[in-house]
Amino acid sequence: MAILTETPAGPVVLSQEQVEEIGRALDEIRARVTDDLGERDREYIYSIIKAQRGFEIAGRGLMYLGFLPPFWLAGVAALSVSKILDNMEIGHNVMHGQYDWMREPGLNSRVFEWDTVCPADQWRHSHNYMHHTYTNIHGMDRDIGYGILRVDEQQPWNPLRLGNPLYAFFLMVAFEWGVMGHDLEVENIVQGKRKWSDIKALVKGQVRKAGRQVLKDYVVFPALTGPLFLSTLAGNFTANIVRNLWTFSIIFCGHFPSGVQTFTEEECTEETQGEWYVRQMLGSANIDGSRLFHIMSGNLSHQIEHHLFPDLPANRYPEIAPEVKALCEKHGLPYNTGSFSQQIGSVWAKLFKLALPPVLAGKPQPNGVIVMRRGQASEVGV
């Protein structure tokens, strides 16, 4: 498994013994946190739910005063925060099973539904299973470019890639709709690899869920404000766009900035738990920020920790992050983190760079870390 970018002293060689040591250390962290789950975790998620509902009520109420610009803006801001919290810190994390241990019906990952057009069951398949199991493996993880973007040098270039930044912009604006269509595998439909019979049930579920969302945000709530119908509709639309922009940015910062690498299927066959952990650590990136920033990101600002422990409550990620970072430093592995501006700037720079043909984009960075796998010789040629 070859990963990351070249270091000044040449590639780091991680032995199988080191990989398994990392695996044991991370297993111990998981066990310790799992044993400690309890009241403070309950209080945390309940406080987030309370805040989310409060912002939604405030936002809906302020729309009745939407004829006054300051109140309309305040209503949009409140609804935006509500939708971001519902999407990131509540919906995403609950559907990962982070709170199943509470045995609270409203926080059950198998039945929870969120305030977005993507059906929860389809998201659990495309995200929980496909992405988190096969993180950054070409041909298996469809989150690598979402079927439309070139985000890695290993993806082939063709003239259509010239529109890479433009495609990314439209995906960012309509991100909830892009997530909804993810499980359809549109690129495979276009290529004739999927038939109507393969996607019929998915489309029915999407139409049903999206229909409810459109009815709620663009018909029912605007109608409840009477003569302010158009003002409220515009406010709801704007809040959805704000949520889309934020969600896209946080997710892309955690997956596609400089230094995050992808892998081949051959490199990841018959992985041990330790090897899976290493792939997660080196295929993700964090974002530095305040406690409020971490909450608003659903703690996906700790994407490395999330990929290691997707079913642990996300409020625990900040406290285990220093241990994960220390583990990386101990074994000479990079811990990819930076400010929001650094990470998002890196993402967009890559989107523009990879739109160009390889002859103009330049050569890809050579591998910086080599992981020795079972059966490999003790010496590695670079």
Image: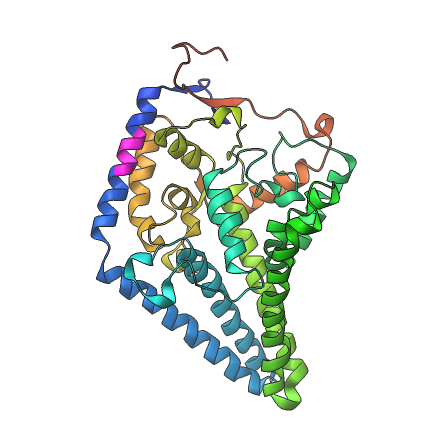
Which residue is located at x 41 percent, y 56 percent? 93
Q: Position of residue 365 (x, y in %)?
A: 57, 25
Q: Is residue 341 visible?
A: no
Which residue is located at x 48 percent, y 64 percent? 113
Residue 52 among magenta residues: no
Residue 24 among magenta residues: yes
Q: How many numbered circles does the render carry?
A: 0
The one nearer the camera, 262 or 35, is: 35
Q: What is the quadrant of residue 212 in the picture?
A: bottom right
Q: Position of residue 326 (x, y in %)?
A: 30, 35
Which residue is located at x 38 percent, y 68 percent? 106
Q: Position of residue 286 (x, y in %)?
A: 44, 44
In the picture provided, is 23 more to the left or to the right than 284? Answer: left
What type of secondary structure mainly makes up the magenta span? helix
Q: What is the quadrant of residue 160 in the picture?
A: top right
Q: Is residue 124 visible?
A: yes
In the picture provided, is 183 more to the left or to the right than 195? Answer: left
In the picture provided, is 314 more to the left or to the right than 229? Answer: left
- In the image, is residue 22 above or below residue 165? above
In the picture provided, is 68 more to the left or to the right than 100? Answer: right
Residue farthest right in this picture: 159
Give the residues in magenta.
Answer: 22-27
Residue farthest bottom in this picture: 227
Q: What is the quadrant of residue 363 in the picture?
A: top right
- In the image, is residue 80 above or below residue 278? below
The one nearer the camera, 137 or 344, is: 137
- The colour scheme used here is rainbow
Q: Position of residue 103 (x, y in %)?
A: 30, 62
